[in-house]
Image (spheres, helix red, strand yellow):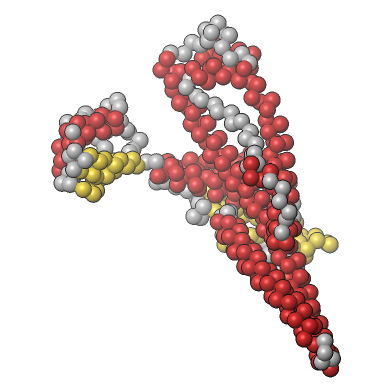
């Protein structure tokens, strides 16, 4: 089917071992216990009014937005069932002449791209969750203010009750019955006060949790180095990227930070990364950042005055933050850590291998941390010395350690 052109896009991915998973939408089902129609209590009504209903409205809006995105993305799924020759004929003409090794390498590159897109999708999901949590926080604050207003009314009722008790002191025959009635009302008010206070404490805890989330997802990556009448200088990513903003004349009728706003003549980006000394991950991060900067075209058109500068700094910081996280992940993936354990040999140890760009043609440096038993660096070195470098080097190292030390 591949050679004749009848293969579909989905089958082509399968041939290259690139598995594209299309997630099905999952709809929640109410449990059977919710179908029981019991009369709501006063506590249930308060929960519904101040907590459940506001949250439900926000979640329904979020679900509608997600449903709309699913509808927009569905047409793209049908591409998987279309013949590859109809979708990208030039790719099919090239790929059908490739060897199995070239197809395997091409599939590996596609899997790398798929991994990057998956990470980007997760980051977008986190951003959407942040927006959802902000809405929930605003709703909780609004309900908190309503509860405060209700407490003030309760205080007014208590004052009225005290005034009534003072006025009824002269009526000796009815004072006992009226006193009991007032005590009953006060007891109910106290219970309501305790409930409101408990709800306030829950809202405060929710507010603190939301503030922690907002703090966690703060993407501010710039540092102000200079601000004068002529220009402002901002540094990003450990001073490796500099943005110079040149100011123009003031703008009538427009203000920025309680001062007359200024026009912006130019925004210039400059890299100070020593690419010869920097690790490959840093060079890649720098390349991706400037790729984004160049893709936006003229920054002066998007940021003509100081009023637009905060949004521009936020957009740049968001990209810098993403690229910085990618660089940290690349640095982390340069090392491999393996944990071995065997009750038969009464041994448990951790082996860390340092990878480099010349893997698998060079011997790997290693470090051993012994948890149980007497197997250490000497024993591991003796085994690794008998494993030649080459194809499936890591796999052969693990197999040799298991056969020689743990069986």
Asked whether 96 or 230 is in front, the reply is 96
In the image, farthest residue toward the top: 4
Residue 246 screen position, x and y as percent: 67, 56
Asked whether 43 or 226 is in front, the reply is 43
199 sits to left or right of 342: right
> What is the quadrant of residue 183 in the picture?
bottom right
What residue is at 68 percent from the left and 28 percent from the top? 74
> What is the quadrant of residue 249 in the picture?
bottom right
In the image, farthest residue toward the front: 173
347 sits to left or right of 187: left
What residue is at 17 percent from the left and 39 percent from the top? 345
Whether residue 135 is visible to the viewer of this picture, yes or no, is no
280 sits to left or right of 95: left
Quadrant of the rendering where the C terminus is positioned: top left
Against 366, residue 260 (above or below) is: below
Residue 89 screen position, x and y as percent: 61, 14
Q: How many marks?
A: 0
Asked whether 158 or 354 is in front, the reply is 158
Residue 195 screen position, x and y as percent: 66, 68
Asked whether 380 or 271 is in front, the reply is 380
Against 133, residue 393 (above or below) is: above
Whether residue 405 is visible to the viewer of this picture, yes or no, is yes
What residue is at 58 percent from the left and 56 percent from the top? 213
Against 118, residue 272 (above or below) is: below
Residue 382 screen position, x and y as percent: 15, 37
What residue is at 63 percent from the left and 16 percent from the top? 82
Against 383, residue 305 (above or below) is: below
């Amino acid at each position: 089917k591949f050679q004749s052109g009848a293969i579909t896009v989905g089958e082509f991915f399968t041939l290259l071992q690139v598995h594209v998973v299309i997630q099905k939408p999952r709809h929640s089902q109410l449990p059977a216990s919710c179908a029981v129609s019991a009369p709501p209590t006063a506590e249930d009504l308060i929960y519904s009014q101040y907590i459940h209903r506001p949250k439900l409205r926000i979640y329904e809006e979020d679900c509608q937005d997600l449903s709309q995105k699913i509808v927009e993305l569905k047409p793209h799924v049908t591409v998987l069932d279309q013949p590859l020759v109809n979708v990208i004929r030039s790719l099919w003409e090239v790929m059908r002449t490739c060897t199995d090794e070239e197809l395997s390498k091409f599939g590996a590159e596609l899997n790398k791209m798929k991994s990057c897109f998956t990470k980007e999708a997760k980051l977008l999901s986190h951003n959407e969750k942040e927006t959802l949590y902000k809405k929930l926080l605003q709703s909780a604050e609004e309900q908190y203010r309503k509860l405060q207003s209700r407490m003030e009314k309760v205080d007014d009722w208590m004052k009225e009750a005290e005034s009534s008790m003072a006025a009824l002191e002269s009526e000796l025959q009815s004072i006992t019955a009226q006193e009991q009635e007032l005590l009953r009302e006060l007891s109910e008010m106290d219970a309501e006060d305790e409930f409101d206070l408990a709800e306030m404490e829950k809202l405060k805890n929710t507010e603190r949790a939301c503030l922690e989330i907002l703090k966690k997802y703060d993407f501010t990556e710039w540092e102000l180095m200079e601000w004068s009448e002529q220009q402002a200088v901002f540094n990003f990513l450990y001073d490796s990227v500099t943005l110079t903003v040149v100011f123009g004349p003031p703008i009538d009728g427009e203000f920025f930070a309680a001062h007359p706003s200024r026009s912006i003549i130019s925004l210039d980006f400059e890299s100070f990364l020593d690419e010869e000394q920097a690790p490959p991950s840093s060079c890649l991060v720098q390349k991706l950042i400037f790729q984004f900067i160049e893709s936006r075209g003229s920054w002066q058109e998007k940021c003509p005055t100081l009023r637009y500068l905060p949004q521009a700094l936020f957009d740049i910081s968001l990209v810098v933050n993403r690229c910085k996280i990618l660089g940290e992940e690349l640095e982390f993936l340069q090392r491999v850590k393996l944990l071995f354990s065997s009750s038969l040999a009464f041994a448990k140890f951790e082996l860390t291998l340092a990878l480099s760009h010349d893997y698998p043609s060079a011997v790997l440096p290693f470090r051993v941390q012994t948890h149980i038993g007497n197997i250490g660096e000497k024993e591991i070195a003796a085994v690794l010395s008998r494993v030649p470098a080459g194809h499936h080097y890591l796999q052969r190292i693990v197999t040799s350690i298991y056969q020689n030390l743990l069986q």
